[in-house]
Image (cartoon, rainbow, N blue to C red):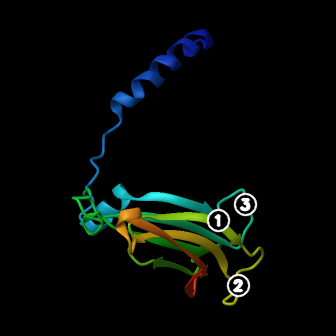
Amino acid sequence: MSRARLIILIPFLLFALPAFAQEMPLVPEKNSALVTLLNDMRMLGERGTPPEDLGYIVRVIASGSEGECDGTPQSCPTEYAYIAISELGESPPMNLYRLPDSYGWTLDSWVDFPKGDPAINKFVVLRMTRQVIAKDPSKGWFVPEQFEIRVNAYSATMRKL
């Protein structure tokens, strides 16, 4: 076969290849809690993914119950915030922490993010605010509470500011 005919034939063969490929069906996830979490989550923040060269990868995620407020602050849907943290490397230590329920979580700032090798005594420090029911709802249903959170792959603490 001449080179010119081959050059003309190759593009036609490449266009025909997808027609010969078999489609593979995907199986829906059976874990309903995981389905709800992944569909309803909001990414509040993420640090440590490349090109950042940090000792940890941290994701702060919020996910809540569905619904709307029905006339009272107590009837409003709540949400949880999750902090997923992992060291880097092959089969790294990792953990997932769930913060208390709230009427809304926000990530305010990353206070400290240690560089270098992670260790049991090195912590990522961040500040987050949650909304709680106000003592005097006539001035607004919710008021903010700010927390400082210290977290690594082995332990975590939170302290109200």
Of circles 2 and 3, which is in front?
2
Q: Is residue 57 left or right of residue 11?
A: right
Residue 144: x, y in percent?
49, 69
Q: Quadrant of the C terminus?
A: bottom right
Residue tagged 1: 109
- The local crowd at label 1, few if under 14, some if 14 to 19, many if 20 or more residues have their Cα within 10 Å, is few
Secondary structure beneath disc 2? loop
Could you tell me if the residues under marks 2 and 1 are in contact, i.e. CB atoms within 8 Å?
A: no
Q: Earlier in the sequence, mark 2 or mark 3?
A: 3
Q: Earlier in the sequence, mark 2 or mark 1?
A: 1
Could you tell me if the residues under marks 2 and 3 are in contact, i.e. CB atoms within 8 Å?
A: no
Residue 80: x, y in percent?
40, 70
Residue 121: x, y in percent?
69, 90
> Is 34 in front, or is 132?
132
Three-letter code, disc 2 = Lys
> Is 35 in front, or is 97?
97
Q: CA distance from mark 2 to mark 1?
A: 18 Å
Q: Is residue 60 left or right of residue 52?
A: left
- Tell me: residue 13, above or below residue 80: above
Residue 122's disc is 2
Q: Is residue 131 left or right of residue 126?
A: left
Q: Quadrant of the N terminus?
A: top right
Residue 52's disc is 3
